[in-house]
Image: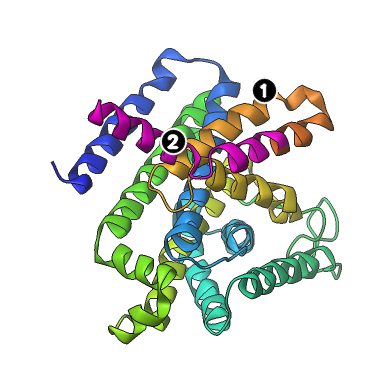
Amino acid sequence: MTPLRRDLLVVAGLAALTATVPVFVHTRYIITQTTLLFIWAIVVTQWNLVLGVGGIFSLAQMALFAVGAYVTAMLGYYWGVPLALAMPAAGVVVVLVSLVIGLACLRLKGPYVALLTLAIAQMLYLLIVNDTACFTNPPSGCLPLFGGVRGISRFGDLGFRELLGAKWYIAHYYVGLALLTLAVLVSILIIRGPLGLAFQALRDNPGYAMSRGVSKFKYQLWVFAVSAFFTGLAGGFYAAQFAVVGPTVFSLSQLLLLLSMIVVGGLGTIWGPLLGAVLLMLADEGMRELGEWRDIGLGVVLILFVVLLRRGLAGAFEDLWSRWRRA
């Protein structure tokens, strides 16, 4: 069996197994937290394409996520666009934004890409929080174009609240699972296919790759665009899930948590981001009552993995599998 076919069968099996969770688990909190896990897993899976596979040290992922959330909310609030249409439209807008960022990063390497993308994210954050001029006057009071520090709410939903009543969150669970499954499938096809080989060549030996005709310009923009579309979709679904979008989506602590998921799971691997997302979400949930010690605990988990398991969970599982096969 080829690695591609094996990975596709694993995705199908995991998706089918995860789809049964609401049948046996009836606690709303667990279902909604798992839905949030799906959202973050989409983000880290696509971020891994840029960072781990493409070798581009971009920190713009949360900014792209926020753009997807804001575009979805604004389309619903100002123009009454159904969120089922606003979400893919937001994904397209995020692709355009990512292409601009990608073009700006083409001549930069390493920490300079990180600084530029982080600066872009902070610029967008400051643009929103400093937007205080009235754009419209709803009953709740003056509302800036981007919602300012209050954010934007009452922009509609996916229609499941009216259709299913109090059980709407179960439908959102399946929407999140479907989006994650699609994102993982695309990630597998890229990593296991010719595009993945081109990205890895540019990451490991860019000079030789370009001398053999692999265009850094074309492939970097490709990986930015593909990852941005699903990141924008995840942002749009986040807006639909929580029915409010504010500056907190630019949170630096959330960006670091998602980056930690990739490192803990295994940078550049197929299953690493998913494993890291599950582990750190469980750790974060388990330390929720610890207050300030929560961030310290997550930091300790990250340090242990960086020191003891440099290839992350996915690398550790690969090593164990290789030893078992040789035994």
Residue with the mark numbered 1: 286
State the residue in front, 50 or 245.
50
Which numbered disc covers residue 20?
none
For the C terminus, give its image quadrant: top left
- The correct choice, above or below, for 275 with respect to 234 in the image is above
- Residue bounds of the magenta highlight: 300-327
State the residue in front, 97 or 111.
111
Which of the 4 quarters of the picture holds residue 113?
A: bottom right
Q: Considering the numbered disc 1 on the image, is that residue within a helix, a strand or a loop? A: helix
Identified by mark 2, the residue type is Ala
Which of the 4 quarters of the picture holds residue 107?
A: bottom right
Residue 226 screen position, x and y as percent: 41, 64
| Residue occupying the point 22% across, 37% down | 9
State the residue in front, 286 or 160.
286
Residue 127 screen position, x and y as percent: 78, 70
Task: Report crowding for label 2: few under 14, some 14 to 19, many 20 or more residues within 10 A (C-alpha).
Answer: some
Identified by mark 1, the residue type is Gly
| Residue occupying the point 40% across, 46% down | 179
- Look at the magenta stretch and give its main secondary structure: helix
Residue with the mark numbered 2: 316
Could one spot residue 169 in this view of the protein?
yes
Q: Considering the numbered disc 2 on the image, is that residue within a helix, a strand or a loop? A: helix
